[in-house]
């Protein structure tokens, strides 16, 4: 299965289209990707990587947000928070990586996923949508315990 044509900025009509600098939309992207990949979806594709300031072009007027927003008049572009959230997956989960099981205390309220890459390295991505830092420990039989903290409203990727 492949999730295609994902986007942000279409569900809430009060904030329809582009909202520059909106970190909640970055969290939305990560949540959507994590839910899909944790439920046997093999990939996730955005509707558009780059759009204009209005959220187009779009022939039906269905304006949405995008990881990159282009202001053609000023000849500049903006990397939205969605761009940085997407990078945690596209940069570190390389082709032919295999999802591996990872369990956690459900009370910590983290969203997460782990992969073994074809180069033998492990990757774990954690999303913390709470208002407080969450300490975590990863146990790997080959390296032992890895201890870290995921900051409030943060996303972090660990590679070992």
Image (spheres, rainbow, N blue to C red):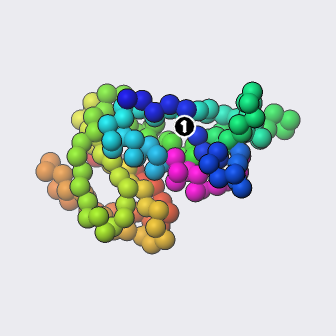
Residue at figure coordinates x 59%, y 32% from the top left: 47
- 106 to 160, vertically: above or below: below
Among all residues in the image, which is located at the extreme bottom? 132
- Residue on which the image places disc 1: 6
Residue 30 makes an appearance in the image: yes
Which of the two residues, 28 or 127, is positioned nearer the viewer here? 28
Q: Could you classify mark 1 by the number of other residues whose Cα lies within 10 Å: few (under 14), some (14-19), or many (20 or more)?
A: some
Q: Is residue 32 left or right of residue 148?
A: right
Where residue 126 appears, as percent x and y from the top left, is 38, 54
* Quarter occupied by residue 50: top right
Which of the two residues, 8 or 71, is positioned nearer the viewer here? 8
Residue 79 makes an appearance in the image: no
- 70 to 113, vertically: above or below: above
Q: Secondary structure at mark 1?
A: strand
Q: Is residue 7 left or right of residue 96?
A: right
Where residue 26 appears, as percent x and y from the top left, is 55, 51
Among all residues in the image, which is located at the extreme left? 141
- 50 to 142, vertically: above or below: above
Residue at figure coordinates x 31%, y 33% from the top left: 97
Where residue 51 appears, as percent x and y from the top left, is 70, 35
Q: Name the image quarter holding the N terminus.
A: top left
Residue at figure coordinates x 50%, y 41% from the top left: 87
Residue at figure coordinates x 31%, y 69% from the top left: 107
In the image, the segment drawn in magenta is 18-29
Where residue 73 appears, as percent x and y from the top left, is 86, 35
35 in the magenta segment: no
* Quarter occupied by residue 108: bottom left
Which of the two residues, 99 or 73, is positioned nearer the viewer here? 99
């Amino acid at each position: 299965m492949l999730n295609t044509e994902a986007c942000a900025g279409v569900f809430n009509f009060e904030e329809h289209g582009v909202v520059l600098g909106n970190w909640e939309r970055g969290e939305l992207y990560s949540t959507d990707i994590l839910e899909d990949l944790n439920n046997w979806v093999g990939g996730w594709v955005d509707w558009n990587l780059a759009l204009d300031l209005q959220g187009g072009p779009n022939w039906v007027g269905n304006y949405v947000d995008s990881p990159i927003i282009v202001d053609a008049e000023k000849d500049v572009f903006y990397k939205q928070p969605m761009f940085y959230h997407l990078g945690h997956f596209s940069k570190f989960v390389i082709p032919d990586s295999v999802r591996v099981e990872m369990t956690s205390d459900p009370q910590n309220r983290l969203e997460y996923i782990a992969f073994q890459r074809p180069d033998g390295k492990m990757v774990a991505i954690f999303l913390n949508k709470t208002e407080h830092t969450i300490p975590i420990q990863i146990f790997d039989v080959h390296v032992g315990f890895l201890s870290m903290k995921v900051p409030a409203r943060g996303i972090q990727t660990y590679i070992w």
